Image: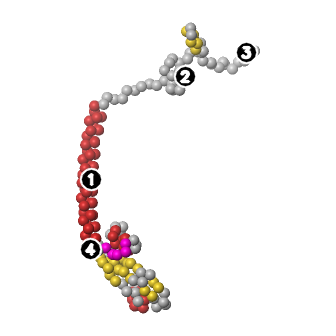
Amino acid sequence: MGWSQRLFGVLRRALSKEVKEQVGTDRFGNKYYYIPEYKNWRGQTIREKRIVEAANKREIDYEVGDIPTEWEAWIRKTRKTPPTMEVRIHTMEEIMKNEIYREEIQMKSQDFYEKEKLLQEESNKELPPPVQTQIKGHASAPYFGKDEPSVTPTSTGKTFQPGSWMPQDGKRHS
């Protein structure tokens, strides 16, 4: 930012009656400001503003999570009052509890997967190889599980099984 831009910014703020009030800082060093509603030099009403001045001045250095949740809620106006020190201490305690719980769960899941892997190796040793079965036909076929029909008709008294039809060599008989 050049010196002329800075000079223009200082003059604009001096003429605008904009009063920036610092309401707090977070554990990362970000500063939070509140600018109440005011009328500018033309008589227009300017709404209240909530501003964060990042500890990292360069926008490139900003990452998601650099603004704590309670402060982000205040900036986005979902929270009416800025977080107090008690709320911030309570939030830090909750974060520490959650971190300890996450580590415990991670250790338990690692133990579980190691035990599961050992059980799987043992069960693979105990099981015999799968038996290969040969399937003939399809379950919906009328002769599934029976001998396939022959070309010649067969008869055994009460049951008559016609032979399968085979086309002839294409000659017509008159």
Check disc 2 and give the amino acid type.
Pro
User: For residue 173, which numbered disc appears in the image?
Assistant: 3
- Alpha-carbon span between mark 2 and mark 1: 58 Å
In the image, residue 8 lies at what x, y percent?
42, 88
Check disc 4 and give the amino acid type.
Met
Residue at the (34%, 83%) spot, across then down = 21
Which circle's residue, 1 or 4, is located before the other in the chain? 4
* Foreground residue among 143 and 158: 158
Residue contact between numbered discs 1 and 4, judged by CB atoms under 8 Å: no
Q: Is the stretch drawn in magenta largely helix, strand or loop?
A: loop
- Alpha-carbon span between mark 3 and mark 4: 107 Å
Check disc 3 and give the amino acid type.
His
Residue contact between numbered discs 2 and 1, judged by CB atoms under 8 Å: no
Which circle's residue, 3 or 2, is located before the other in the chain? 2
Which circle's residue, 2 or 4, is located before the other in the chain? 4
On the picture, is 31 further left or further right than 162?
left
Residue contact between numbered discs 1 and 3, judged by CB atoms under 8 Å: no
- Residue that carries the numbered disc 1 in the rendered image: 105
Which circle's residue, 2 or 1, is located before the other in the chain? 1
Check disc 1 and give the amino acid type.
Ile
Labels 2, 4: front one: 4
In the image, residue 101 lies at what x, y percent?
25, 57
User: For residue 85, which numbered disc appears in the image?
Assistant: 4
User: For residue 48, which numbered disc appears in the image?
Assistant: none
The C terminus sits in image quarter: top right
**Residue 50 vertical placement versus 105 (above, below):** below
Which residue in the rendered view is the most extreme toward the top? 157
The N terminus sits in image quarter: bottom left
* Foreground residue among 111 and 75: 75
Category of crowding for the residue at label 2, using alpha-carbon neighbours closer than 10 angstroms: few (below 14), some (14–19), many (at least 20):
few
